[in-house]
Amino acid sequence: MRLGPLTDMSPEQTELHDRIVARRGTVPGPFQVWLRSPRLGDLAEETGTYCLRESALPPRLRELCLLLAARHFEAQHSWNAHVDKGVEAGIDRAALLRLARGQEPEFTAEDERVLYRFATEILDEHFVCDETFAAARELLGERELVDVVGALGTFSMFAMLLNTFEVDLQPGCEPPFPGIEGYRRVGGRDGAV
């Protein structure tokens, strides 16, 4: 990680640290960074918790939102932390492996296909066409669509944080995306490997 360990935490940092440990059992990689800005970290942790545990989406689609944002931003740490959770929630592992390789995932569940199309359009094109919006609204619902956009934004923010601060991959985990070794990107920006 680009930032060293915190050795002397402020009262606000200690309070956030303790709250994260109480909720998650530990202070995972991204939260090591969020501790540097405890107010923003608190809001990010609360929003992330809502998106993963409380939103109107079923757990399977919550995890899929996270994995789609992680893949879009090549956030390896986030992908590794959640790919098994996505499978446990009911997403087909083969589809996720295709997604990790940059291939069409071929989701079998209709709601996953619609969510994938919706998320891909908003992440790649920054807009959603009328046909995709109507299909997502019909299948998922209005509140759920708001939660999808909120989740994609939240998980994109986490992905950018993980990549910017080069949060280490989990011990024993390999980079999940082809052509990416550590934080080095093919054809461009170099970082620590």
Image: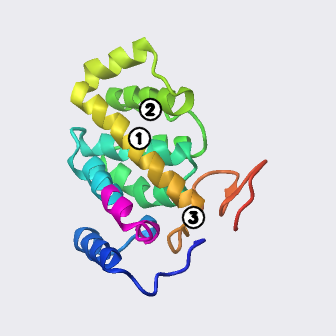
Residue at the spot 36% in from the left edge and 73% down from the top edge: 27
* Neighbours of disc 2 within 10 Å: few (<14), some (14-19), many (20+): many
Q: Earlier in the sequence, mark 2 or mark 3?
A: 2
Nearer to us of marks 2 and 3 is 3
Give residue 92's quadrant in the image: top left
Q: What element carries label 3?
A: loop
Residue kind at label 3, given as amino acid type: Phe
Residue range (magenta): 31-43
Our reading of the magenta stretch's main secondary structure is: helix
Q: Is mark 1 on a helix, strand or loop?
A: helix
Q: Can residue 97 be seen in this view?
A: no
Q: Is residue 54 visible?
A: yes
Question: Where does the image place residue 12, in percent across and percent down from the top left?
Answer: 31, 74
- Asked whether, in this view, residue 27 is left or right of residue 19, the answer is right
Q: Could you give the CA–CA distance between mark 2 and mark 1, rounded to whole angstroms? A: 7 Å
Residue kind at label 2, given as amino acid type: Ala
Give residue 10's quadrant in the image: bottom left
Question: Where does the image place residue 110, in percent across and percent down from the top left?
Answer: 34, 26
Residue at the spot 32% in from the left edge and 59% down from the top edge: 45
Observer-nearest residue: 7 or 82?
7
Q: Earlier in the sequence, mark 3 or mark 1?
A: 1
Q: Is residue 34 magenta?
A: yes
Q: Are marks 2 and 1 in contact (CB under 8 Å)?
A: yes
Determine whether 165 is above or below 21 in the image: above
The residue under label 1 is 152
Q: Split into 4 quadrants, where in the image is the N terminus?
A: bottom right
Q: Do the residues labelled 3 and 1 touch (CB within 8 Å)?
A: no
Determine whether 173 is above or below 144 in the image: below
Residue at the spot 20% in from the left edge and 48% down from the top edge: 54
The residue under label 2 is 119
